[in-house]
Image (tube, rainbow, N blue to C red):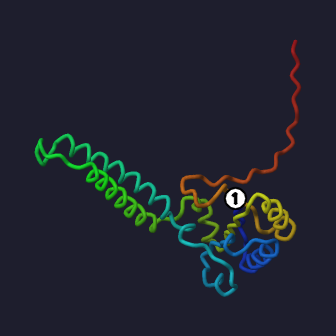
């Protein structure tokens, strides 16, 4: 599944895009619009984005969980090395597993709280456009739908610009791929050997 990112200049254009995408078989579940005008989206019955798309909860949660796991392992290593309960006290293995699990969950929780306060890293390059009043339309398409959606958008909505393609939006660590510009014809230079 791919996510196609289109920048739409106005609410009416976004409404038309949404209607036409529904006609070619894209349901609301696979269509999300990010805008600073959430009330305008609601009035027009346009499916807006969710917090997983606009905030960095998932990415920062994974980072926090990884850091918590590492801290948990370091803590267990220190417990095993210093033996604060005495050399002859045997700590069962499940206690170590519980400690690492608790540290991992605490790290995920802290990371998620950090992620709530930050914008999704994939959307930072579109921040100025969204703040300027444009609408970022995210369309999730399967392989067989991609060409139909691209063709329809090119024919009916040339003002809605395709700005990026992502393999899948949920992967928090991938970067958004830029749309390749059409290659300009390069003059061919023939090399001559003497």
The front one of 151 and 24 is 24
Q: What residue is at 36 percent from the left and 51 percent from the top?
A: 69
Q: Position of residue 127 (x, y in %)?
A: 59, 65
Q: What residue is at 66 percent from the left and 72 percent from the top?
A: 32
Give the farthest residue toward the bottom: 43
Classify residue 133 by image quadrant. bottom right
Q: Label 1, secondary structure: give it.
A: strand
Give the farthest residue toward the top: 194
Q: In the image, is residue 183 above or below residue 192?
A: below
| Left or right of residue 157: residue 90 | left
Q: Quadrant of the N terminus?
A: bottom right
| Left or right of residue 95: residue 30 | right
Residue neighbourhood size for the residue with mark 1, other residues' Cα within 10 Å, grouped as few (<14), some (14–19), many (≥20): some
The front one of 74 and 125 is 74
Q: Position of residue 113 (x, y in %)?
A: 40, 66
**Residue linked to disc 1:** 2
Count of all numbered marks drawn on residues in the image: 1
The front one of 127 and 68 is 68
The front one of 165 and 160 is 165
| Left or right of residue 147: residue 134 | left
| Left or right of residue 60: residue 42 | right
Classify residue 116 by image quadrant. bottom left
Q: What residue is at 68 percent from the left and 84 percent from the top?
A: 45
Q: What residue is at 88 percent from the left and 12 percent from the top?
A: 194
Q: Position of residue 34 (x, y in %)?
A: 63, 72
Q: In the image, is residue 29 above or below residue 104?
A: below
């Amino acid at each position: 599944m791919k996510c196609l990112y289109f920048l739409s200049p106005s609410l009416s254009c976004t409404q038309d895009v949404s209607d036409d995408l529904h006609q070619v078989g894209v349901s609301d579940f696979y269509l999300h619009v990010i805008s600073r005008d959430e009330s305008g989206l609601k009035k027009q019955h346009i499916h807006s984005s969710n917090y997983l798309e606009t905030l960095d909860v998932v990415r920062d949660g994974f980072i926090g969980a990884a850091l918590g796991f590492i801290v948990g392992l370091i803590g267990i290593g220190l417990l095993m090395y210093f033996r604060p309960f005495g050399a002859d006290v045997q700590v069962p293995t499940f206690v170590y597993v519980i400690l690492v699990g608790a540290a991992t969950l605490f790290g995920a929780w802290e990371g998620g709280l950090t992620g709530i306060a930050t914008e999704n890293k994939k959307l930072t390059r579109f921040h100025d456009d969204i703040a300027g009043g444009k609408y970022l339309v995210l369309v999730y398409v399967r392989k067989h739908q991609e060409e139909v959606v691209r063709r329809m958008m090119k024919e009916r909505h040339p003002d809605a610009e395709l700005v990026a393609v992502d393999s899948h939006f949920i992967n928090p660590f991938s970067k958004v791929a830029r749309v390749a510009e059409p290659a300009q014809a390069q003059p061919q230079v023939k090399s001559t050997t003497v």
